Image (cartoon, helix red, strand yellow):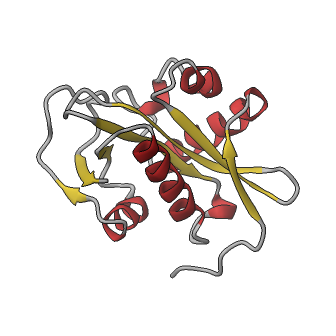
Amino acid sequence: MEQQPLSSVTIRLITAADDPFIAKIIRTNFEQYHLNVPGTAYFDPELDHLSAFYSANPCRGYFVAVDENGTVLGGCGYAEAAVFDRCAELQKLYLSDAAKGKRVGRRLSETVEQAARDAGYEKLYIETHSKFDAAIRLYEKLGFRPISKPRGVQHGAMDRFYLKSL
């Protein structure tokens, strides 16, 4: 059941100071679902330096949600996706337990969607795992539609794929 939204959450671009906090949130989510296995973002080489990865190319962006105390609650980004023309991948949408069910994921997703549209992308692609059931419900509410596994999937352990026109 969805709880009340958090009263004071700010969505902003990631900074280097956020890197260790968002990496911990991402790894914790994979561990909670027993998905800390090869073929997942858990082992992405850029995971400990997301700010550098996403700022290295103007066709990418990563946003974090922070509370009134500046605590990082989660994040979400986008980067070019070679699986479809003029397509970005919505990447690394993960929340701390304190932020789950409080519309933080929705706000992050909508921010990323607008940023990807502003960057000239026409579609957003997602690869996820069926164990991330709450995320899948969110994606479907946001208008993402399931697709067959495309060629060139980055994370081989993922088993659910979605696409949305922007």
Residue 99 sits in quarter: bottom right
- Whether residue 7 is situated above or below residue 132 in the rendered picture: below
Asked whether, in this view, residue 147 is left or right of residue 108, the answer is left
Nearer the observer, 45 or 79:
79
The x, y position of residue 76, in whole percent, is: 53, 45
- Whether residue 37 is situated above or below residue 143 in the rendered picture: above
The x, y position of residue 28, in whole percent, is: 59, 43
Q: Which residue: 76% across, 74% down?
A: 7
Nearer the observer, 127 or 118:
118
The x, y position of residue 101, in whole percent, is: 56, 71
- Whether residue 102 is situated above or below residue 123 in the rendered picture: below
The x, y position of residue 9, in whole percent, is: 73, 62
Q: Which residue: 14% across, 41% down?
A: 149
Residue 19 sits in quarter: top right
Asked whether, in this view, residue 130 is left or right of residue 148, the answer is right
- The outermost residue toward the right is 69
Q: Which residue: 80% across, 50% down?
A: 71
Nearer the observer, 133 or 54:
54
- Whether residue 64 is situated above or below residue 57 in the rendered picture: below
Residue 120 sits in quarter: top left
Q: Which residue: 34% across, 37% down?
A: 88
